[in-house]
Image (cartoon, rainbow, N blue to C red):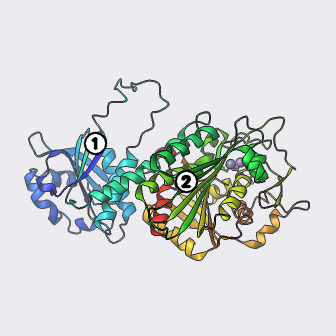
Amino acid sequence: MDFQAIATAPIDWTGDGLVLGLFEEDFAEAGTLPEPLTALDEMLDGAIADLITEIKFKGKAHSGAASRVGRHTPVKKLILVGLGKGEKADSEAVRQAAAKAAKLAKAQKCATLGVALPTVGDGATTVQAIVEGMGLALYEDKRFKSKSKDEEGNDQNDESGYPQTVSLLDAADQTASIARAEQILSGVVLARQLVAAPPNEVTPITLAETAAAIAAEYGMELTILEKEECEKRGMGAFLGVAVASDLPPKFIHMIYKPEGTARKKLAIVGKGLTFDSGGLNLKGPGSGIETMKMDMGGAAATLGAAKALAQLKPDVELHFISAVTENMISGHAMRPGDILTASNGKTIEVNNTDAEGRLTLADALVYADALGVDAIVDLATLTGACLVALGNDIAGYWSIDDDLAAELKAAAQSSGEKLWQMPLEQSYFEGIKSPIADMKNTGPRPAGSITAALFLKEFVKKTKAWAHIDIAGPAWTSKAGAYTPVGATGYGVRLLVDWVMAA
Ligand code: BES
Ligand code: MN
Ligand code: ZN
């Protein structure tokens, strides 16, 4: 799909499909067509008015319809989408309306599409949201399908019915906004592909190779710490998790440096379990073990953000970190009851091998904390408790710094990737005190996502601002959203990009 920003107005545009976005306010006067559409409607021989009447279109959010207009008209198909109330509309309303339009255009087999959605905020934000919404909505993953024909006998790789060229109308000056959105999309697509790929394909080895490919393509520095190097650094918590896997652990550290002097230094840390069996506390029926390839969703968001940000080129130094391994079982697996020593010297009694993410993050956070960065943000598919609390659409986050918390909240608002702040209730640390070691890796069932955050906090000492984002819910979904498919969502990339670009 090629996007272009052009000066042409809807009434002068010629092609397969024309997308018009409308607010509820546009229908304030019952029975009359919103002012900007009257001339267009006249030109299309009343097709707009007819469609609006037929489907009782009122500009409501998530509503939309398409109709054939004519054979000899400048446009063959008309696609209407609603953005809800204008005063409430934000960039997410634009993203969702654009996604709806893209799906309708695909179903209508429009190869060329003209898009006229109302400006929400400013032109740049609107165009970026349109490209994101359309690009994400039409994303498909056919990498693991062998057959090239679908059930109806159509060639699966035939893209002729998709929108091929999308022209953003009345938007001549927005070429840079399209480029920005496409750079972000490339990062989200990478994250989706990494999470969706099976655990026999995305392994610690191949994830490190992916990091190497990104670093090479965009000129970033990369260090991969092999097992021996991790041992030397005393990363006993990370290596305790890795010990049962037949695959070598990989500790990824990628650095983006801006051309001039860096205004800030930031670190992003992602949980990178390419598969989580639970270990000897093996995940049982109903635990979702068959989807635990998604347990590297934090690492995927980290690498996706790295790919996007290396193209966006902010004037900040960025460190992308992930301690990557699998949580497996074997005769030499980590036992419940084992005591591990992390790289900061803290001892951890492992009372549940399935709470492995925090063990790998412990050493990754100690490493990030030593870099002297202004802020660390970690993303992790960490707890079922957070998924239970906030569901699939919202990630929980904890922060030791109010400014960082506010920055993340703003990034959630602009990116449409939802967050909800949770308390770092220090008194709950009681629950993970160990009679024999410095702490245990799990506490009681209540507030399980909070004790997980408190555990991580023990490994950040120097850095003034640290936030932990539990993405167990939004990294993966069994229900398709406006522009997210079933399965891997790519959650976190847009949030991280917006955070870094505004930080
Ligand atoms: N990777 C899981 C958390 C998870 C669960 C992510 C469901 C996505 C969907 C994590 O390693 C885990 O197993 N957590 C345990 C912690 C418990 C043993 C304290 C959990 O949430 O059950
Ligand atoms: Mn686990
Ligand atoms: Zn896990």
Residue 101 percent location from the top left of the image: 30, 50
Q: CA distance from mark 2 to mark 1?
A: 30 Å
Q: Amino acid at mark 1?
A: Pro
Front-most of residues 499 and 443: 499
In the picture as drawn, the residue positioned furthest to the right comes out as 436
**Residue visible at 61% across and 65% down?**
376
**Residue visible at 65% across and 61% down?**
368
Residue 115 percent location from the top left of the image: 24, 53
Instruction: Name the residue tied to disc 2.
Output: 302
Residue 488 percent location from the top left of the image: 52, 45
Front-most of residues 151 and 351: 351
Is residue 455 found left or right of 94 in the rendered image?
right
Please tell me in which quadrant of the rendered image residue 92 appears. bottom left
Q: Amino acid at mark 2?
A: Thr
Front-most of residues 375 and 144: 375
Work out whether 122 lies above or below 363. below
In the picture as drawn, the residue positioned furthest to the bottom comes out as 402
Q: Name which of mark 2 and mark 1 comes first in the sequence.
A: 1
Residue 234 percent location from the top left of the image: 78, 53
Ligand 3 lies under 8 Å from the Cβ of mark 2: no
Is residue 179 found left or right of 141 in the rendered image?
left
Instruction: Name the residue tied to disc 1.
Output: 163
| Disc 2 secondary structure class | helix
Work out whether 279 lies above or below 24. above
